[in-house]
Amino acid sequence: MLSQVLTGTGGVGKTQLAADYARTAWDSGEVDILVWISASSRAAITAGYAQAGVEILAADPRDPEQAARAFLAWLEPKTGQKPCRWLVVLDDVSDPADMRDWWPPTSPQGRVLVTTRRREAALTGAERRLVTVGLFTPQEAAAYFTAVLAAHDRHEPINQINDLASDLGYLPLALAQAAAYIIDDAITCADYRQRLADRFRKLADLLPEPSGLPDNQATTMAATWSLSIERADQLRPAGLARPMLQLTAMLDPNGIPSGFLASAPALNHLTLHRMPGEQPPAPVTAEEAAGALQALHRLNLIDHIPDAPYATVRVHQLIQRATRDALTADQHDQLAVTAADILTAAWPAIERDTALAQALRANAAALVRTAEDALYRPAPHAVLFRIGTSLGESGQTNAACDHYAYLATSIDHRLGPDHPDSLMARQAFAQERGKAGHAAGAAAALAELLPDCVRVLGSDHPHTLATRHHLATWLGEAGDAASAVVAFEELLPDRLRVLGRDHPDTLATRDALADFRGVAGDAAGAAAAYEELLPDRIRVMGPDHPDTFISRNNHAFWQGEAGDAAGAVVAFEELLADRLRVLGPDHPDTLATRHALADFRGVAGDAAGAAAAYEELLPDRIRVMGPY
């Protein structure tokens, strides 16, 4: 009969499943001999077999090894002997090597059931099948929790039970111990959820006392994984599993690209936290980082799927919580900064890959939830601004507005309203507010910001000049193109004087001035200004820079508005090919170019072609940017 090896992370209920299976087999009369062995070490396995040999075969207890061998030999099927139906359960095998030469024999009358947190190939074979025990489903979790409470005459709203099960990640052990805590402390599910959400409480403080553990459990949830971490840390490459798990504890439990964990900031962290002994420690390689992930995977502390592009590492949220609880305050804050450095290093300047951008934002959001305060010391980390930039560039302008509004408030609270990053956050908020369709509101916010920039930074500071630039832009977008032209004409000499002719910000002001001249009614003048600007953009920033593309886009637009629709179509076709190559098909600027190309095809006389192009474009815009 095939042996079953139940594997899974600590707390999924492997032992409970094995106990239920064994009890059912015994009570139903399906087996004549039932042997249960706590198999946490080779010595414990030997002792368990020896005890069975003594009790069943009257073997000599003074020679445990021989008694154990005799018992395994007795399990072998023998011709002419009356069949004996047996079941051997080996609970909590901690090391596959402990089972070498101690596997029960294959027998048509015998069954073997093993539970373990390991999942190496050595545990499987021709006669052994690995069965992964997972979490509860939401329905199973709710049914279990409801039944436990009902047994103590307690009843809770089903929505609170569902939400609590989700907060606990549907882990059976967590649900059992949370239920015991709720019953013993006479609190509600809502009370427990509130305590669980408090980042300053340790997980151990939200579990029953060891004497009050339910279902004959031996350890609290907070201690369940500590032994697994120690064992993973002993696997090759020794000493790297724990610091790697600490890194994963700061990021998204639902998916961390493994490339993040092999980046320079991650490797530096692993090098600094190798096991003591090697001085100075040898630099950790990307291969060793992958080995650390596999060590954690082998102990079921994480799921590591190397061929999954952007969700290659997953870790249960309570393992993350327990890992963070073991850190000192300084270790926690340093890990948060390291995780932020990892994300900043991984974030591309141009987000061609929308899936990667989503993974970066999800991991950044998890980091902020986990360790927000550390990201403001001594100054706001760049990742906080990069989140907003990514949201805005992906077309999620309302989300970007919310992010920058919160960021500005947070910086004000922690560092004061005159901190330069507070001014930058306010500027970014106004920008995204304008992009979201509130041009007048953006202009008003920037007009309020400008005096603070002058007072704090000075009139010639680049951020002050940038605020003037954005204010002029949104004045024009709000309908006052003439005032925008005047403002840009006043700004341009200051940017030339402070920054120089070839500075990207100076070129941006020339671009905006040309654009709003067109908006104010001088389309030909705008086209001519872009004709002068484009060679400078290409020379300074390169032909493939996004800002060069913007100038090409605006040049093509005003060329068409000045009466050369056919020339605009050609220019947009050339621009589209380059934006597809550099930015990718899903970048908002690529979609905008397709929009403009379709528009000018219609202006040039091909109304049917324009309509067909919009028909193709619309689903892509909805998919990438959302219906609103």
Image: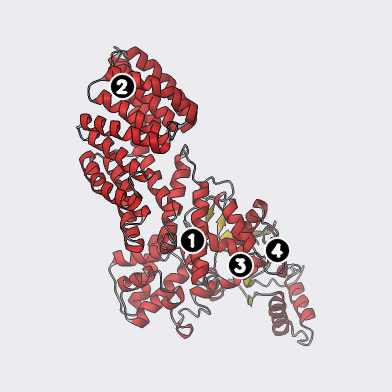
The image position of residue 627, as x and y in percent, is 29, 38
Q: Amino acid at mark 1?
A: Ala
Choose the circle earlier in sequence order: 3 or 1.
3
Q: Given this view, does label 2 or label 3 mark the residue nearer the observer? A: 2
Q: Secondary structure at mark 1?
A: helix
Badge 3 local density, few (<14 within 10 Å), some, or many (20+)?
A: many
Q: Amino acid at mark 4?
A: Pro
Badge 2 local density, few (<14 within 10 Å), some, or many (20+)?
A: many
Q: CA distance from mark 3 to mark 1?
A: 32 Å
Q: Is residue 427 above or below residue 174?
A: above
Residue tagged 1: 336
Q: Quadrant of residue 494?
A: top left
Residue tagged 4: 280
Q: Given this view, does label 1 or label 2 mark the residue nearer the observer? A: 2
The image position of residue 596, as x and y in percent, is 33, 24
Badge 1 local density, few (<14 within 10 Å), some, or many (20+)?
A: many
Q: CA distance from mark 1 to mark 4?
A: 24 Å
Q: Amino acid at mark 2?
A: Ala
Residue tagged 3: 116
Q: CA distance from mark 3 to mark 4?
A: 37 Å
Asked if the residues shown at circle 1 and circle 2 are in contact, with their CB atoms under 8 angstroms apart, the answer is no
Choose the circle earlier in sequence order: 1 or 2.
1
* Frontmost residue, 130 versus 41: 41
Q: Amino acid at mark 3?
A: Thr
The image position of residue 125, as x and y in percent, is 69, 57
Asked if the residues shown at circle 3 and circle 1 are in contact, with their CB atoms under 8 angstroms apart, the answer is no
The image position of residue 144, as x and y in percent, is 39, 69
Could one spot residue 415 in this view of the protein?
yes
Residue tagged 2: 526
Q: Secondary structure at mark 3?
A: strand
